Image: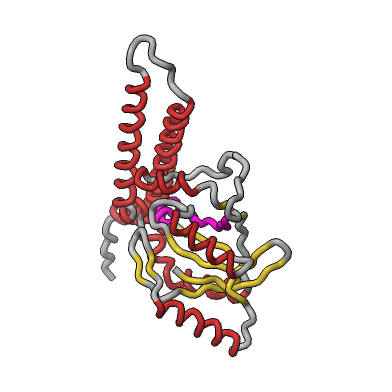
Amino acid sequence: MGLMQGKTDGDAIIVMDAFALPVEGTETRVNAQADAYEYMVDYSQTNKQAGRLENVVGWYHSHPGYGCWLSGIDVSTQMLNQQFQEPFLGVVIDPTRTVSAGKVEIGAFRTYPEGYKPPDDPISEYQTIPLNKIEDFGVHCKQYYALDITYFKSSLDCHLLDLLWNKYWVNTLSSSPLLGNGDYVAGQISDLAEKLEQAENQLAHSRIGPLGPPRKKEEESQLAKITRDSAKITVEQVHGLMSQVIKDILFNSVRQSNRSRNEQSGPEPMVEA
């Protein structure tokens, strides 16, 4: 968890930098004590003294393994921040899904004013919500809205990324998403099985008796969501398997071909002078 610094340009919020806060947290909750607020004030004052004019424009935190959205606590925190400082946005990052999917899972959000009822529009981007988080997501999903995100890199950013790549490219090539995310994938499959069992029970109750009511749209929608969840898990695993196959072809096949070529050539004959 931390704060982001930047500026505004019209209706866009440009994030220039970010700094972490000394907070204690678990997978579901982050507790910011007085030390964190004191650190935040000291950091901002030091930035001003150093000639950096960026203001605090938002906060960020992570949802490891359960998607980018705002929980009830997140909504309350964001509403409070928007009341005392504008503009202010909240960013959520899922590092576990980022590693599994091979792309950055990130979302930027702002809350609606208190008492505002948003239009009943469908969600622009579908995302998988674990079964134990669905209730929290559904209760608060109409209290905030997502922002479009674009990225930019300065010349210094490019230089730093090049240095990091030169240092960690071996680890990147040698890592396997199939092995590194085994626990996450197992949890996803277990959650999917629970959702299927729940949907099956609901369908069984809705079809009791020969004159029972037909299946509802909500149940059909639930099955459609389960199908999309399973397809997403499958695609991520196929991508991980494809990367492993490509690495095997690029590196192991070359070594095997060289070995077979040496075996076919045999020992060189001895020539007497």
Residue 75: % across, % down: 49, 57
Specify the quadrant of the image occupied by residue 51. Answer: bottom right
Relative to the observer, which residue lies in front, 251 or 144?
144
What residue sits 62% from the left and 74% below the top? 155
By what rule are the colours in the image chosen?
A: secondary structure
Q: Is residue 242 visible?
A: no
Chain part drawn in magenta: 96-111
Relative to the observer, which residue lies in front, 187 or 245?
187
Q: Residue furthest top?
A: 210
Quadrant of the image containing the N terminus:
bottom left
What residue sits 35% from the left and 67% below the top? 25
Residue 156: % across, % down: 59, 76
What residue sits 38% from the left and 14% below the top? 212
Specify the quadrant of the image occupied by residue 46. Answer: bottom right
Q: In the shown orientation, is residue 122 left or right of residue 198?
A: right
Residue 112: % across, % down: 59, 54
Q: In the shown orientation, is residue 155 left or right of residue 24?
A: right
What residue sits 40% from the left and 40% below the top? 234
| Looking at the image, residue 21 lies above or below residue 205 | below
Q: Is residue 105 magenta?
A: yes
Q: Residue furthest right?
A: 10
**Number of marks in the rendered image:** 0
Residue 139: % across, % down: 46, 46
Quadrant of the image containing the C terminus:
bottom left
Relative to the observer, which residue lies in front, 96 or 254?
96
Relative to the observer, which residue lies in front, 99 or 69?
69
Q: Residue furthest front?
A: 115
Q: Is residue 263 visible?
A: yes
Q: Is residue 147 magenta?
A: no
